[in-house]
Image (spheres, rainbow, N blue to C red):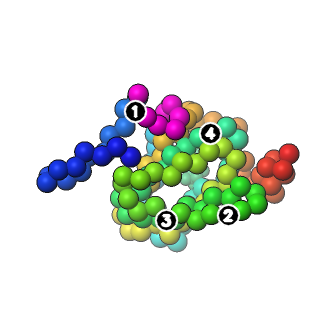
Amino acid sequence: MPEVRDQLGALGVVEKDSPFPFPIKRVYFLYDVPSNAVRGSHAHKMLHQLIVAVSGSFEVELDDGRTKTKFLLSSPNAGLTVPPGYWRTLKDFSAGSTALIFASEEYDPSDYIRDYDQFIAWANS
Ligand code: TYD
């Protein structure tokens, strides 16, 4: 993530025309997440996302239907790109952590696959 750092701290910035994996249409954030909570547990058919731990840390597991890969996000200047077609699970949120998520589309419930068996069938089709 773009960062401006000096002796007074760091500033992260993303603008409309910043180099980014996709054009941004939506930004949302997760906070006050209990440490035992599991968020996500769904896939998207079209949506691209980029996830940043702007404070604290949490784990993101990505599953393409064959392989599961875990990422520990713990730095505000590093983002994880999640293309469409990955079952994602976010967990192990540290106290006070905040997940900032950039998304390529506006909120659309019809883009979600919330059933794992349906996801596997969709991924294999
Ligand atoms: P959801 O995407 O299931 O969150 P997570 O994957 O982090 O567990 O969304 C949780 C709720 O928030 C659900 O009722 C839909 C709503 N929501 C919106 O209204 N707008 C949004 O942009 C998002 C991401 C969720």
* Marks 4 and 1 close (CB-CB < 8 Å): no
Q: Is residue 38 above or below residue 24?
A: below
Determine whether, in the image, residue 113 is placed left or right of residue 2: right
Residue drawn where x is 70% and y is 41% of the image? 45
Q: Estimate the spatial distance between the alpha carbons at disc 1 and disc 2, rounded to whole Å.
A: 30 Å
Image location of residue 4, percent across then percent down: 25, 45
Q: Which residue occupies the foreground of this view, 117 or 85?
A: 85
Q: CA distance from mark 2 to mark 3?
A: 13 Å
Within 8 Å of ligand 1, the CB of disc 1?
A: no
Mark 3 or mark 4: which is in front? 3
Task: Answer whether residue 96 is visible to the viewer in this image.
Answer: yes
Furthest-bottom residue in view? 36
Looking at marks 4 and 1 on the same chain, the residue that comes earlier in the sequence is marked by 1
Q: For the residues marked 3 and 4, what is the alpha-carbon distance in whole angstroms?
A: 22 Å
Q: Along the polypeptide, which appears first: circle 2 or circle 4?
A: 4
Q: Which residue is mark 1?
A: 18
For the C terminus, the image quarter is top right
The mark closer to the camera, 4 or 1, is 1
Tell which tag, 2 or 4, sits nearer the viewer: 2
> Can you tell which quarter of the image residue 76 is in?
bottom left
Q: Which residues are magenta?
A: 17-24
Q: Give me the C-alpha separation between circle 2 and circle 4.
A: 19 Å
Residue at 57%, 33% in the rendered image = 105
Q: Which residue is mark 3?
A: 72
Q: Residue at x 45, y 51 (%)?
A: 79
Q: Amino acid at mark 3?
A: Leu
Q: Residues within 10 Å of mark 2 (few under 14, many from 20)?
A: few
The reply to whether the residue tagged 3 has its Cβ within 8 angstroms of ligand 1 is: no
